[in-house]
Amino acid sequence: MILKEGIVLKEINFECFRCEKHNDNCEKTLNCCCKNCFKSDDTNLLKHLENNELDSIVEGKQQIRYKPGETIIKQNTSSTYVICVRDGLAKVYVEGIKGKSLVVRLIKKLDFVTGGDLFNGNVQRFTISAVTPVTCCLINTTKLSQLFSENNRFAVELLRHHAKQNNALLDKLVVLTQKYMPGRVADTLLYLKNDIFKTNPFSVPLTRQDLADMSNMTKESLVRILQQFKSSNLIKTDGNTIEILNEEALQEISKNG
Amino acid sequence: MILKEGIVLKEINFECFRCEKHNDNCEKTLNCCCKNCFKSDDTNLLKHLENNELDSIVEGKQQIRYKPGETIIKQNTSSTYVICVRDGLAKVYVEGIKGKSLVVRLIKKLDFVTGGDLFNGNVQRFTISAVTPVTCCLINTTKLSQLFSENNRFAVELLRHHAKQNNALLDKLVVLTQKYMPGRVADTLLYLKNDIFKTNPFSVPLTRQDLADMSNMTKESLVRILQQFKSSNLIKTDGNTIEILNEEALQEISKNG
DNA sequence: GGATAATTGATATATATCAATAAATGCTGT
DNA sequence: ACAGCATTTATTGATATATATCAATTATCC
């Protein structure tokens, strides 16, 4: 089954005994099934949906694999999908002025991305591309609004999700415009450790350019700040592995801007 | 009626013949009545609500007047209000690091602001303060979610509104981090002319500091750019009156960063 | 007429740019 | 599997520049 040029939907013929939907390897992993996936997380958008309601949106869902570097959603194209990541890491970024990119967010397992123009023309306002191999589900939004009347807790959940995204953007706006470079790099490092990888040390499948795009600076500047942090014994790096040695100090640097 | 220290609700004893709600001067202006107000604009959040549905949220509504400089919503305080501006101009800004403010948006007649943490703890993530005398309605959000099941078009409308805010923030993020000062000032000027005042010349009830906070720079830098624009005959200023003489050139400057 | 806001100039500094090198990564063919 | 070459990525240094800061003056507004 070919969706669009280059992207081929993996044929799924496995019958999942738990959700009664087509699935791959569902019995073994227990997290590949849509209903499990959707329901397994407290912050999950779809947690309030009843089984039959889930069925209606799961039905048209497409589960796709992307190789590192591949584009999942392209800025300024129209699409009516909500993305749910099942596995892997992807970056959400704005392609800005003169080729500059601004990484707004990293997304990983169970993260949802509801597009910029949801119910509003459906033009995507950012690009999402796979950092590691990514498996994700594309859920068609056209069915979402039908659910609102049946289940108003779902509408509330979706609004909450949007409100959170709004807050995150507002925070980012302040951080990127009002903090000096060391503060921004500190924020990026703490974000990676505490929100994304949740281990220490952690191995980052991102280039220095990516880290710079997250921190709104050039790669050269990022490297220099990283060196400063290293010589101050705040962090230790070995290639793409970063260890945070003094989190309090980084928090302090973040606070001071 | 005293809401909180310093803010006194004006007593309203006028009976509006069109909406049968309490109101002031409704017959004369025809735009002060909630239902008119809510329904008079195409982009209005509440346009899909039926009369009885509107009644339920209008009932607990508070209509308040603010003097220039007064705070309508204070960042980091909890409130469950959605703001609807009936008259005047207010600025929505984030109080950032080391006393720096970032004006995210100006709001005027019929604009809605749904708070940062709607359905999510209700902590406001920005401050709103009156620039001119402002009359606005505070609508309690606790009643909003009840309407979703009755009227799913309303939920869609609210989501659309949030999606738009998201896009605006994303745009602002790019503009403020990737454009040089002239580009940012050009954007601010075009925003004032085309989105806010819709006349040319227009009289801006904002200080240079406010304009600088909108453009993410110091007031000194803003003044200098304004002088540059003046000596290039792109604009003409007389105190707080600004006339845009060459919009195409400003668009070009905006584009080039 | 005193406070606040606007303007202008001189200087400092954070950060980008340019350029050169070093290290890693991927590919090719054997 | 591995050496060797090509390509990308990372690092470091020297320099340029956008922008902030500081200071002084002028205009504006209650």
Image: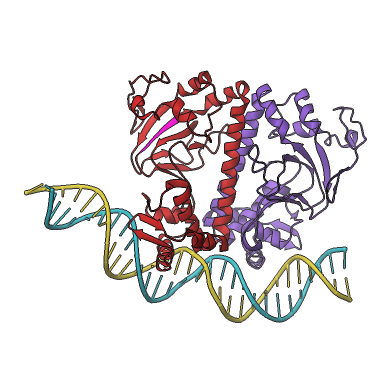
Chain colours: A red, B purple, C yellow, D cyan
Asked if residue B58 is positioned above or below residue B257 in the image, the reply reads above
Q: Position of residue B94 (x, y in %)?
A: 65, 53
Nearer to me, A104 or B26: A104
Q: Is residue A178 magenta?
A: no
**In the image, farthest residue toward the right:** B13
Nearer to me, A23 or B256: A23
Q: Position of residue B54 (x, y in %)?
A: 76, 28
Quadrant in the rendering for residue B182: bottom right
Residue under the image location 62 percent in, 29 percent down: B156
- For residue B230, side relative to residue A219 (left or right): right
Give the main secondary structure of the magenta stretch.
strand
Asked if residue A127 is positioned above or below residue B233 in the image, the reply reads above
- For residue D16, side relative to residue C1 (left or right): left
Residue under the image location 52 percent in, 37 percent down: A115
- For residue B5, side relative to residue A176 (left or right): right
Read off the magenta span.
Answer: A134-138
Count of picture labels: 0
> Which quadrant, please, contains the N terminus of chain A?
top left
Residue under the image location 72 percent in, 58 percent down: B242
Asked if residue A44 is positioned above or below residue D17 in the image, the reply reads above
Quadrant in the rendering for residue A24: top left
Q: Position of residue B87 (x, y in %)?
A: 80, 44
Is residue B257 among the parts visible in the rendering?
A: no
> Which quadrant, please, contains the C terminus of chain A?
bottom right
Nearer to me, A36 or B36: A36
Is residue A53 among the parts visible in the rendering?
A: yes
Q: Position of residue B23 (x, y in %)?
A: 88, 35
Asked if residue B210 is positioned above or below residue B53 in the image, the reply reads below
